[in-house]
Image (spheres, rainbow, N blue to C red):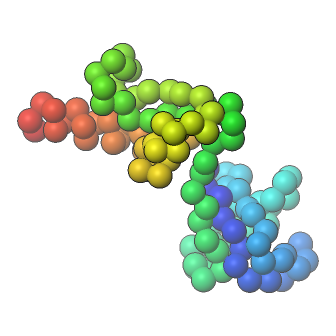
Amino acid sequence: MKRYELLKDTITYSGLIMAGSIFTQKSNSDYGNGSHSVFGDTTVENNPEWFREIKWKPEIGEKYQYIDISFSCENNFIGISSWEDHKIDTTRYVTGNCFHLDSKDVESKAAQIRKILKGE
């Protein structure tokens, strides 16, 4: 799920959308704020100067995935933790090792680690 901040005031069929508004990907093809669809994929892709992608960060108590190379993880190097804003949480976040539960990125990174450890 991608999130974007609108960088400039923009007029859409919904009216004036102010700079600083946050939009969440509602499906593969549209973005909205709240319950309203405002932008389609082509608008976001064709106007990169209008948007800044916001890196997802869990809320307190929200679960997230991470790559666990401590070998104590039973799920193929993928760990799940609850965000408590502790040092380990923020370290994982700033090093790019914090993934939404729906993310497929964590599995591809874990597969890369498995290949490296097998010497492939």
Residue 12: x and y, percent?
83, 78
The answer to whether residue 20 is seen in the rendering is yes
| Viewport quadrant of the C terminus | top left
Work out whether 51 lies above or below 11.
above
Locate residue 10 relative to residue 41 in the image: left or right.
right
x, y percent for residue 107: 38, 36
Left or right: where does residue 81 sit relative to residue 67? right
Residue pictured at 50% horizontal, 27% vertical: 80
Residue at the spot 78% in from the left edge and 78% down from the top edge:
19
**What residue is at 74 percent from the left and 83 percent from the top?**
8
Q: Position of residue 1 (x, y in %)?
A: 61, 50
Q: How many marks?
A: 0
Task: Please tell me which residue lies in front, 24 or 59.
Answer: 59
Say which of 51 and 46 sits in front. Answer: 51
The image shows residue 41 at horizontal and vertical percentages of 62, 66
Q: Is residue 21 above or below residue 63?
A: below
Q: Is residue 18 above or below residue 32?
A: below
> Where 74 falls versus 14 (above or below)?
above
Task: Decide if residue 99 is in sight here.
Answer: no
Q: Residue furthest right?
A: 15
The residue under the point 69% across, 36% down is 60
Q: Quadrant of residue 43?
A: bottom right
Q: List the single residue furthest toward the front.
A: 87
